[in-house]
Image (cartoon, rainbow, N blue to C red):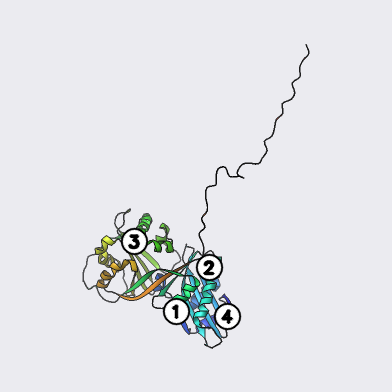
Amino acid sequence: MIRAVTLGDMWSLRRKPRYQHVLYTERLLAYSHRPLWFALQSILAGNHRERTTLVLAEHGSLALVQAMGRLGRPEQDVIYLATSGTRSEQVPSDYELWFHLLHRLCIDAAQHSVQRLYAALPSQHNELREIFRQVGFQAYTHRHLFHLSGPDWDQGTRLAPMRMQSRRDHWAIHKLYGMIAPHVVQQAEVRNARHWTINQPYSLVRRQAWVLGPDDDLVAYLRLLSGPSGHVFSLLIRPEARDQVVDILRFGLAQLSDSRPVYLILREYQQELFGPAIRLGFQPVGEQILLVKHTVVPIRRAVLAPSLEVGLEPHISVRRYVWPPIKQEEC
């Protein structure tokens, strides 16, 4: 039986899971995921769009799935899958349990007006990818993760003349994203200009961003997420300005004042940036495949009704006035 997590499950969640997968997002790289604390928050706030934790208990085995909402967006990220307890022949395999949990998660997400579900899977894990495919998830791009593991091999000191992002830059950043990202990626992510807002209250992850170029025609955009577990950079830059990648990354690194791990996320359609990042000291540490599942189906219908359509005319009868008869006088 699949149900929402309860206080009675807390003892089981304290134990080390038999098998688990953390599906790292940019936020989870900066702020490590704690399944027990996340489950407790789901209980206190209720399983809604912001946090969802579902469990499946069967024959002494417990399976778990967790999803996190995106602030201000009708979307969720699947971030954690785990099984715990004893393994027996009577209990289905871990992948079967996760399949049923993911199927139920999609149903609950649709009931809470979540329009899209996302997942970032390790590209080499074909079994896990097959489960998501059977549930209805589709791949739309790959993402490469780099870790700063050495010094600046070029030993350069030049920094790009970037400025802090302001509210007037939102549309220009969105236009830059539209120039770089393929159409299939844009259709899957459904972003708008408000997506690039960095001010998010009540968040443990600090967001900063800088831009390069004129207000209406940006050349590059650099975003930084900082949390207790590390710093995560993401970069948008025009292909013709790729010679400035090293200077832009140097500018971002110059904003850091601690020794927490530093990550850089680039996508497969940004492969021309891999070389400059590696020369700067970033080394590839992983590759993810990004999946999406839509819980809504677009319906096309006419917006304007025909002007002579039956039923648009008023059916209120007009009052009829009768003139009184005219009296004729006798001569």
Q: Is mark 1 on a helix, strand or loop?
A: helix
Q: Quadrant of residue 249 in the image?
A: bottom left
Q: What element carries label 3?
A: helix
First along the sequence among labels 4 and 2: 4
Instruction: Give me the disc on residue 318.
Output: none
241 w.r.t. 9: above or below:
above
- Real-space CA distance between mark 4 and mark 3, rounded to the nearest whole angstrom: 48 Å
Q: Quadrant of residue 311 in the image?
A: top right
Across and down, in percent, residue 31 comes to: 41, 73
First along the sequence among labels 4 and 3: 4
Q: Do the residues labelled 3 and 2 touch (CB within 8 Å)?
A: no
Instruction: Give me the disc on residue 180.
Output: 3
Q: In the drawing, does residue 152 fall left or right of residue 128?
A: left
Q: Which amino acid does label 4 sit on?
A: Gly
Q: What residue type is labelled 1?
A: Glu
- Real-space CA distance between mark 3 and mark 2, rounded to the nearest whole angstrom: 30 Å
Front tag of 2 and 1 = 1
Q: Mark 4 points at which residue?
A: 8
Across and down, in percent, residue 22 comes to: 44, 77
Q: Mark 1 points at which residue?
A: 127
Q: Do the residues labelled 4 and 3 touch (CB within 8 Å)?
A: no
First along the sequence among labels 3 and 1: 1
Q: Residue at x 42, y 78 (%)?
A: 126
Callout 4: few (<14), some (14-19), or many (20+) C-alpha neighbours within 10 Å? Answer: few
Across and down, in percent, residue 1 comes to: 59, 78
Q: Which amino acid does label 2 sit on?
A: Ala
- Real-space CA distance between mark 2 and mark 1, rounded to the nearest whole angstrom: 24 Å
Front tag of 4 and 3 = 3
33 w.r.t. 269: above or below:
below
Q: Mark 2 points at which residue?
A: 109
